Image: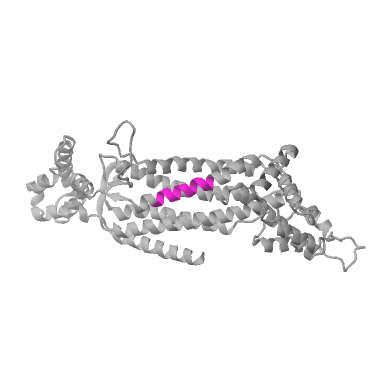
Amino acid sequence: MRAIWSERYKRLLWRRVWVALAEAQCELGVVSPAQVDDLRAHMNEVTEASIARALEIEREIQHDLMAELRAYAEQCPVGGGIIHLGATSMDVEDNADALRLRQALDLVRTSLTDLIRALAEQVLQHADLPTMGFTHLQPAEPTTVGYRLAQYLQDLMMDLDEVERVRDGIRGKGFKGAVGTGASYWEIVGQRSRESPTSDPQSPSTSDSQPLEQRVLARLGLDAFPVTTQTYPRKQDWLVMNALAGIAQSLYKFAFDLRVLQSPPVGEWSEPFGAKQVGSSAMPFKRNPINAEKVDSLARLVATLPRVAWDNAAHSLLERTLDDSANRRVVLPEAFLATDELLAVALRMIRGLRLNRTQIERNMRTYGPFAATERLLVAVTQAGANRQEMHERIREHSLAAWARVNAGESNPLVASLCADAQITRYIAPEAARALLDAEGYVGDAPQRARALAHAALARCNRTSGER
């Protein structure tokens, strides 16, 4: 990812665009084969020395692309004079940026697919493991570890859909000149419209006006927007940023949940912690969730960047202003580098996820009976009891049990309910005890979790095959 957004690679792409343009112009008889051969021979000579020369020129002329153009031309004694013929800066920069966006999204897609695969495997491994569910950060009803993990998996699969949709929609500006009309290229290749009654009927018509652009785009392996201003629509950057922010959002939730579950009062999950890892400079006992905190920190950064892209699209007045130019040099690489790091850290966390089964079982023993009272209420009602009376009876037992739990004692709810004569009139104590075992009160969560995991793995295999 760093290579894609590096200064050297940017300049290599600019040169690739210039060469593709010259090759197409050569086919149309505008420039000579010798000139194109010269450009092609020096296309990859982007070195520390050439970049330094371009920066030296830029300090004088205050134009980065023209500085690179002149440095390139100095390397090309035969073809240097025809570089950029008919082009405006954004014919080069925006097409190069489109290529970079597409390559960067390909990397994101690969990393996201790897993460989805690792998470799906964890879902399958823990699909049946019961654990307390929490709503409002209060114990609720049981779920399974695999089903909880499946929530994050489902979010990331939606993110993969969006990344692929945006990636497949990436378009370049094409070659349309200073305001998007293509006038300069039209002049060069002699394809001006002749729509007056005196026009030569053998002259090229407006429908024949795009062969140069199509020839260049074919060499770059790029599609272009049909109409543009001086730039491609900056809405494209916004769509890309939104896709990355979606990944950040999904990983933020996972990491934040892990931080809650790693806190000692819950103590059920933890991120990997090395044997020599130091948690705190002051407190030797600390096992801080530094990776989850890092994910949440970076995710918050990525979440802010779509707003910058939104402003760039909205503030590109008429045929173009420079409101976008400076910040795009920062936000595009920053968003991709941060997302790349998010995915790498999240993959390590998922693969190294640690479960404390003792704590999971303890929390189930402590809070599970409260959730399972619903099963008991249904059973005694079906056996002939008055539901409202039994609801109040069970509520009284539950509040008394909560008080004991809050005092640090074991949960007495199962024993007290099974000893209540008003309840055992309708259901045997053994049957009541079985109903109050919350481990079986998870519905079809295991089946749903496994189905989603298998679908995710199939999707990952399909995506890998397409690559």
Answer whether residue 209 is visible to the viewer in this image. Answer: no
Q: Which of the two residues, 40 or 376, is positioned nearer the viewer here?
A: 40
Residue, far bottom: 202
Does residue 155 appear to the left or right of 105 in the view shown? left
Q: Is residue 337 magenta?
A: yes
Does residue 203 appear to the left or right of 141 in the view shown? right
Seen at 30% across and 39% down, the residue is 287
The image quadrant of residue 313 is top right
Colour mode?
one colour
Q: Which of the two residues, 69 or 28, is positioned nearer the viewer here?
A: 69
Does residue 301 appear to the left or right of 286 in the view shown? right
Q: Position of residue 89 (x, y in %)?
A: 72, 48
Seen at 21% across and 54% down, the residue is 439
Q: Is residue 187 magenta?
A: no
Q: Give the range drawn in magenta.
A: 335-347
SS assignment for the magenta stretch, majority: helix
Residue, far right: 198
Total numbered labels: 0
Answer whether residue 352 is visible to the viewer in this image. Answer: yes
Does residue 212 appear to the left or right of 346 in the view shown? right
Q: Position of residue 327 (x, y in %)?
A: 61, 40
Q: Which of the two residues, 182 or 219, is positioned nearer the viewer here?
A: 219
